[in-house]
Amino acid sequence: MKIKKMKLKDWIVAERGRRFYAAVAGLVALFLLLIFILGAGDDPGDSGGLGLTYEASVEPFTIKVTESGSIESQNRVVIKSQVAGTQVIIYLIKEGTIVKEGDLLVEMDASALKDKLVEEEIELEDAEAELISSRENLAVVKNQSEADIAQAKLDYRFAQQDLDKYIEGEYAMSLKRANSKITLAKAELQQAEDRLNGSQELFEKRYISETELESDELAKQRAQMDLELAIQEKALLETFTYDRQVAQLESDVEQARLALERAERKARANIAEAEARFSARRAEVQREQVSTRDLRTRIENCRIEAPSAGMVIYAPQGNRWQEEVLQEGLSVRERQELIYLPTADAMSAEVRVHESLLNKIEVGQEATITVDALPGKIFTGTITNIAVMPEDGGWRNPDLKEYVTNIAINETSADLRSGMTCQAEVLVAHFDAVLTVPVQAVLRVDDQPTVFTPGWGGRPVPVPVKVGMDNNRKIQILDGLSAGTKVLLNPPLEEAERGPSDAPSSQEGSSAQGESY
């Protein structure tokens, strides 16, 4: 029993020693690991397994936009076809010829236009003859209408006068005549009665014969009948003749008034018709005159002369899929560019700026231009125009969007020629001392610009920053980062893909809270 107790005691001591040495070994290993981590962070090119780092620094910062293009003349005169439709070139001056004002550049076939001009001139003469005829006809219609209206007015006035004459004159005279006739008939009847009475006394006394008495009785009867007839004629005049005559004369007045109205309406219609015919003929003449004048102009425009001195350069023809060469026999359309007449007095560089760089350039910015054909020469210029609409890359690259930008060259040189290839470098901005980091070090996390710094335990730490402009290599840091801070050049892309809804909580870590750029 004693031996067993000693063995158990030795085992306990030995176990305690083993555990002590194990704890010491663990502490040493942990200490060495901390030394390794701290020592690894001192290396500027290593981040403890996170990749390369860059130390943010304050330095001069220049932003430039460089694009290629070609040299063009600022005072280039563009010669275009001014003939409507399509015409065939029958003469073309040789490219590169130095011309002076008034020299013949292009002549197009005008034979068909000349034939059509002859037809138009004949039609114009016919139209002018019709115009003269319609003008004379209008004058005749107006004169005839005036005569018809005057005659109708005269007839109307005469009808009114006839009515007034009958009522106030003829009827009164007829009535007076009837009354006079009655009065005379009464007097004659009275005389006949007196004579008959005397004859009866004489007949009774046998102084006259019976035949004489019968004659006096017959005379009385005649006088009686004349009186009755005169009374009937007056009654007929007052009851029938007057009403009928007045009605007839009033009808004549109304008919004359309607005839006058018809004459006036007919006159207006005839004059309007004649005027419309005259206007139509005049419009026809004007149309023919315009057509004739247009044909003469088109024939004149078939000969294109140099408006100013310069060197002849053929304008590019066709399109990007099928190019054509300007030459005799080529059919050209109206407004098609044919020849350029550039002058060397003022030149410009025409470059194409990608849409991603459009927000960096503006009219008035300065630029330097180098020409491939003139090595060693540097020209300066100023942006004068930026196209409003972009031009695509055609069927080869339809998604490419570039804006044509013109840069006026300040210097003049006889060596500069239109079409030379050039490079333009536009100075966007320059800062003497700003804090910058490489553009690949900045990610957008939770829709905010963010850089990542190496942290303890090999975990990248997001730092929200406020950024400024970039030059495609480095970007300006306005706030959120200090000089000397190391940032990861290969930040974790999965953080950039994380949306705001995926942002970690306050217990899991702080999210980047910076302004977007």
Image (spheres, grey):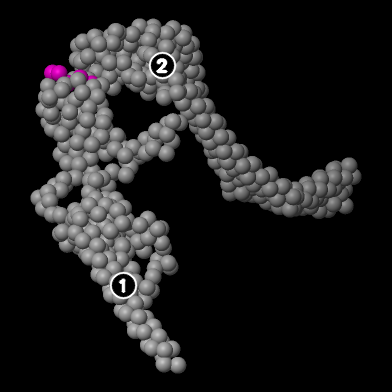
User: Which residue position holds label 1?
Assistant: 26
Residue shown at the point (20%, 54%) measured from the top left? 44
Front residue of 6/281: it is: 6
Q: Is residue 127 magenta?
A: no
Name which residue type carries label 1. Gly
Residue at the right extreme, as displayed: 210
How many C-alpha atoms fall within 10 Å of the one at disc 1: few (<14), some, or many (≥20)?
few
Q: Looking at the image, is 90 positioned above or below residue 134? A: above
187 left or right, relative to 23: right
In this picture, which residue range is highlighted in magenta?
414-418
Residue 510 x %, y %: 32, 71
Residue shown at the point (19%, 36%) measured from the top left? 425
Residue 319 x %, y %: 42, 23
Q: Decide: marks 1, 2 in contact (CB < 8 A)?
A: no
Please name which of the two marks, 1 or 2, marks the residue nearer to the observer: 1
Residue 444 x %, y %: 33, 58
Q: Which secondary structure, mark 2?
A: strand
| Label of residue 324 in the image | 2
Q: Which image quarter holds the N terminus?
A: bottom left
Name which residue type carries label 2. Glu
Front residue of 81/5: it is: 5
Residue shown at the point (56%, 43%) measured from the top left? 161
Instruction: From the image, give the main secondary structure of the stretch colored magenta.
Output: loop
Front residue of 350/119: it is: 350
Can you see residue 267? no
Q: Looking at the image, is 57 positioned above or below residue 353? A: below
